[in-house]
Image: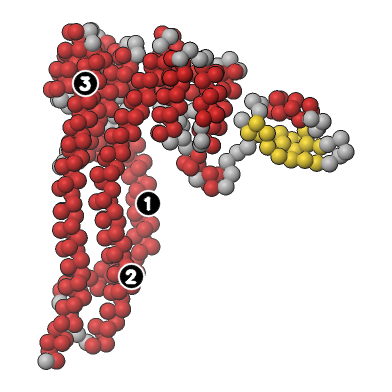
C-alpha cells in the first residue's frame, strides 16, 4: 500500500514523501534503515477528483476480467497464488486496480484466505464471485473456477455493451431534442411573444399553447426541478420496499418490446450464473438462492427463491420451475434434460447461450424500430414548434397583401 510519511534526519531536518510498504511497521523500519526518524505515517487516501467522485476510483469490468483471467492462467501454469498476485500487480496499468491488489496481497500475507481477502473488496467483487472462489478453495479447482469466472465476466460485458450500443443513438437523439425544446422555450419564444404583443396579432391555438408553456416554464422552472427531485426521492424510497418493487418490476416486464428484452436478459444472467455455481460444485438449493440475487427484478427473484424452497422439500428443479408461470418452457425442458443426464450445469449454460442470441436479435430489432419512430416524433415536435411560430407571421403578411 502507499503510505505518506513525515520524518526527521540526523541533522534535524524534516522530510516528507510517499513510500510503498505492506504496513506502517514495515515503512517505519525502512525509514530507520535509511537514518530517518519517522514522525507520522498514514495511508494515502484518494486525492484530487477521486476524493469528490469515488466512482472514478472504481475497478472497471475490463480490469476485473484481466485480473481473473491472469490469475487463472498463472495458477494453471503452476505458480502460487502470491506469485500470481505479485505479477498481476506489476502488469496492472490502473492505479485503482494496483491499490486493490496490494490490499489483497496484504490480507493474504496476514493469514487470510483468498476469498476472505476478496470479501473486503465487496465494491469490486460480487457475492457470487466471492462464493465461487470460496468453493474453489475447498475443491482445489481454483484455476478452472477463475477461468469460468473470467468467461462469465466477459459475456456480461459483451451483453451490456451490445445493449448500450443499440440504445446510444436513440438516447442521444432524445437528449438533443429535449435541449432544443428548452432553448426554444427559454430564449426564442419569449422574444417572439414580445413581437406578437407589439403587433397586436391574433394568435392561433397552437401558438397560444406554445407561449403558455414557455411562460409557465420561465416562471416555475425552479418549482418543477424541486418537485422532480422530491418526487424521485420518495419514489426511490417507496421502490426500496417490497410492495414498490413488486408493482414496478411487474409493470416493467409487461412493457411492449422492452419487457421481452428485460426478461431475456434476466434469463441469460440467471441460467449462466446458476450453471456456473452448479458446475463449481455448489448445492442446487444454495445455487438457486445465490442466483436469485443477480436478477435485479423482484418477480423473478421471488420465483427463484420459491423454486429453491420446493427443491429443498424434494421436488426436482424442473418440476419446481414448471409450477411457476414465469419461467419459459425452453428453460424448464433444458433443466429437466440436465437433471436426467446428470449434466445440469451444461444444460443451463446452453440455455444461457440460446438467450444470448435471442437478446442480440431483439436488440437489433429494437434499434431498427426505434430509429424511424424517434425520427417521426422528432419531426412532429419540430414541425409543431415551427408551425406555431410561423403561422402568426404568415397571417400578418397575408393580411398586408
**Mark 1 and mark 2: span between their CA atoms?**
24 Å
Taking depth in this image into account, of 246 and 62 the one nearest to the observer is 62
- Does any portion of residue 247 appear in the rendered image? no
Label 1 vs 2, first from the N-terminus: 2
Please give the count of numbered marks on the rendered protein. 3
Give the mark, 3 or 1, whose residue is nearer the N terminus. 1
Q: Which of marks 3 and 1 is in front?
A: 3
Secondary element at image label 1: helix
Query: Which residue occupies 19% across, 55% down?
Result: 374
At x 38% / y 57%, what residue is drawn? 226
Give the x, y percent position of residue 205: 15, 74
Mark pair 3, 1: CA separation: 45 Å
Can you say whether 201 is above or below 28 in the image? Answer: below
Q: Give residue 350's mark.
A: 3
Tag 2 secondary structure: helix
Residue 384 rendering spot, x and y as whole percentages: 17, 68
Q: Residues within 10 Å of mark 1 (few under 14, many from 20)?
A: few
Q: Is residue 122 visible?
A: yes
Question: In the figure, residue 390 lies in which quadrant?
Answer: bottom left
The residue positioned 32% from the left and 28% from the top of the image is 294
**Residue that extends furthest to the front in the rendered view of this protein:** 77
Residue 63 in the figure: left or right of residue 104: left
In terms of secondary structure, where does tag 3 sit? helix
Q: How crowded is mark 2: few (under 14 residues within 10 Å), some or many (20 or more)?
A: some
Q: Image quadrant of residue 395?
A: bottom left
From mark 2 to mark 3, how far is it between C-alphas?
55 Å
Q: In this figure, which residue is indicated by the disc labeled 1?
A: 230
Marks 3 and 1 in Cβ contact (< 8 Å): no
Q: Which mark is residue 186?
A: 2
Which mark's residue is nearer the viewer, 2 or 3?
3
Q: Tags 1 and 2 in contact by the CB under 8 Å rule?
A: no
In the rendered image, the vertical position of residue 19 relative to residue 394, given as above or below? above
Amino acid at each position: 500500500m502507499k503510505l505518506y510519511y513525515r520524518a526527521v534526519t540526523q541533522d534535524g531536518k524534516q522530510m516528507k514523501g510517499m513510500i510503498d510498504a505492506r504496513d506502517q511497521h514495515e515503512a517505519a523500519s525502512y525509514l530507520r534503515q535509511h537514518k530517518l526518524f519517522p514522525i507520522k505515517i498514514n495511508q494515502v487516501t484518494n486525492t484530487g477528483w477521486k476524493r469528490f467522485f469515488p466512482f472514478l476510483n472504481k475497478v472497471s469490468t475490463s480490469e476485473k476480467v484481466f485480473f481473473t483471467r491472469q490469475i487463472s492462467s498463472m495458477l494453471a501454469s503452476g505458480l502460487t497464488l502470491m506469485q500470481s498476485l505479485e505479477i498481476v500487480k506489476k502488469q496492472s496499468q490502473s492505479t485503482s486496480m494496483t491499490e486493490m491488489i496490494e490490499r489483497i496481497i496484504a490480507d493474504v500475507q496476514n493469514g487470510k484466505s483468498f476469498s476472505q481477502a476478496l470479501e473486503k473488496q465487496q465494491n469490486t467483487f460480487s457475492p457470487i464471485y466471492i462464493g465461487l472462489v470460496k468453493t474453489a478453495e475447498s475443491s482445489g479447482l481454483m484455476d478452472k473456477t477463475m477461468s469460468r469466472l473470467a468467461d462469465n465476466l466477459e459475456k456480461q460485458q459483451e451483453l451490456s455493451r451490445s445493449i448500450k450500443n443499440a440504445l446510444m443513438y436513440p438516447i442521444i437523439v432524445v437528449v438533443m431534442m429535449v435541449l432544443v425544446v428548452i432553448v426554444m422555450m427559454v430564449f426564442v419564444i419569449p422574444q417572439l411573444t414580445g413581437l406578437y404583443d407589439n403587433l397586436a396579432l391574433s394568435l392561433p391555438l397552437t401558438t397560444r399553447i406554445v407561449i403558455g408553456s414557455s411562460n409557465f416554464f420561465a416562471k416555475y422552472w425552479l418549482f418543477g426541478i424541486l418537485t422532480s427531485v422530491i418526487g424521485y426521492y420518495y419514489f426511490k424510497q417507496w421502490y426500496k420496499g417490497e410492495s414498490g418493487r413488486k408493482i414496478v418490476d411487474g409493470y416493467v416486464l409487461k412493457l411492449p418490446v422492452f419487457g421481452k428484452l428485460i426478461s431475456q436478459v434476466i434469463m441469460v444472467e440467471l441460467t449462466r450464473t446458476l450453471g456456473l455455481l452448479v458446475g463449481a460444485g455448489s448445492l442446487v438449493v444454495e445455487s438457486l438462492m445465490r442466483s436469485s440475487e443477480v436478477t435485479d427484478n423482484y418477480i423473478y427473484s421471488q420465483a427463484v427463491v420459491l423454486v429453491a424452497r420446493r427443491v429443498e422439500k424434494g421436488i426436482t428443479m424442473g418440476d419446481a420451475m414448471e409450477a411457476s408461470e414465469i419461467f419459459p418452457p425452453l428453460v424448464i425442458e433444458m433443466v429437466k434434460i440436465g437433471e436426467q443426464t446428470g449434466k445440469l450445469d451444461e444444460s443451463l449454460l446452453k440455455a444461457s447461450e440460446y438467450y444470448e442470441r435471442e437478446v442480440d436479435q431483439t436488440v437489433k430489432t429494437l434499434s431498427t424500430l426505434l430509429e424511424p419512430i424517434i425520427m417521426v416524433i422528432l419531426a412532429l415536435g419540430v414541425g409543431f414548434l415551427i408551425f406555431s411560430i410561423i403561422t402568426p407571421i404568415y397571417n400578418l403578411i397575408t393580411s398586408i397583401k
